[in-house]
Amino acid sequence: MKSKNLFKMAALAAALSTGFASCSSDDDADNTVVNGSQAALDLACNDWKVARANWENTEAFLFGAADVYSIDPHTDTWPVAANDLADVLRDEKAMSSLDNFIKTANSGILGYHGLEYVLFRQGQPRKIDQITTLEYNYICAVAKDLYNATSTLEAAWDSKESNAERQKIAKEYVATHLAIDDDGNQEGALDGFQNFGKAFKSPGTGDWETALDATLEIISGCQDIIGEVGDSKTDCPIRVRTPPILSLHTPTTPSPTSTTTSSHARMPSTVRWELRRPTRSRLYISV
């Protein structure tokens, strides 16, 4: 985890907390609009993009702490459970104790994509007069939780334990968050905090018995992200433009429903295409 990612998460949290002020209103809470500047919202959106790009650079290494502590699904589940998020924003009990609620919430409303869903519309920053107070409070709480998650990831790989503050954050994070199953739901306590950086450098002291095991973990991580890009990020968006099963009747007559006719024309008449469903429970498609 690069330090500049943490700096951007901190900057995002700061921009949110100092750039807006809640309006006072006698109207229903759901309709209360935040009083703040568009410049502050735009800055938060820019910081989100930078932090997100840095996270993408780590996705070949989603083992160790990212896996054991469920940091990956907690921060990076996609798509967003939009209906669930709408329900939470109407839930007075959840909204009154957001910091605690987020620790045990379904991951489909959290992390980078939870923030993205509320901050952006059609890839552009939302208008400041569209952000409600409840949405603002939710953004701040999720940004704080995301900072704590990425701090935990960095601390768990810091073999020198050089940052006492992040070590403290990491130990508290592991003690208060729960493991996440393939559906994004909480399923039990996390294992105690451990230093994966030390274990990786000293095989036999942690999760890796030998240096070969540690090396194979790196290779496996690279294979996973390559497979994800091929099967989900690239393959799935292309294939959803065609019917799930497309019969090619002749090598020179493409299907009228397809938009990629040039490749169809070169394929033999016996070929059948099938829309392959991603095997992973989450897709990671970013703006």
Image (tube, rainbow, N blue to C red):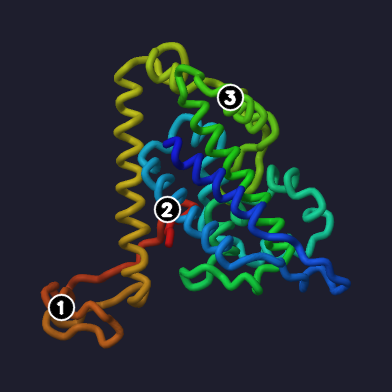
Q: CA distance from mark 1 to mark 2?
A: 29 Å
In the image, 108 versus 14, the foreground residue is 14
Drawn side of residue 242 relative to residue 281, left or right: left
The quadrant the C terminus occupies is bottom left
Q: Nearer the viewer, residue 89 or 225?
A: 89
At x 82% / y 53%, what residue is drawn?
Answer: 96
Whole-percent x, y for residue 134 in the image: 74, 62
Q: Is residue 10 left or right of residue 197?
A: right
Dot 2, crowdedness within 10 Å: few (<14), some or many (≥20)?
A: few
Q: Nearer the viewer, mark 2 or mark 3?
A: 3
Q: Position of residue 273 (x, y in %)?
A: 27, 69
Frontmost of labels 1 and 2 is 1
Task: Please give the residue where the numbered disc 2 appears in the rendered image.
Answer: 279
Return the disc, 3 or 1, that comes first in the chain's sequence. Answer: 3
User: 90 left or right of 165?
Assistant: right
The residue beneath circle 3 is 167
Q: Amino acid at mark 3?
A: Gln
**Label 1 Cα neighbours within 10 Å, binned few <14 / some 14-19 / many ≥20:** few
Residue receiving disc 1: 262
Of pointers 1 and 2, the one earlier in the residue sequence: 1
What element does badge 3 sit on? helix
User: The disc labelled 1 sits on which kind of residue?
Assistant: Ser
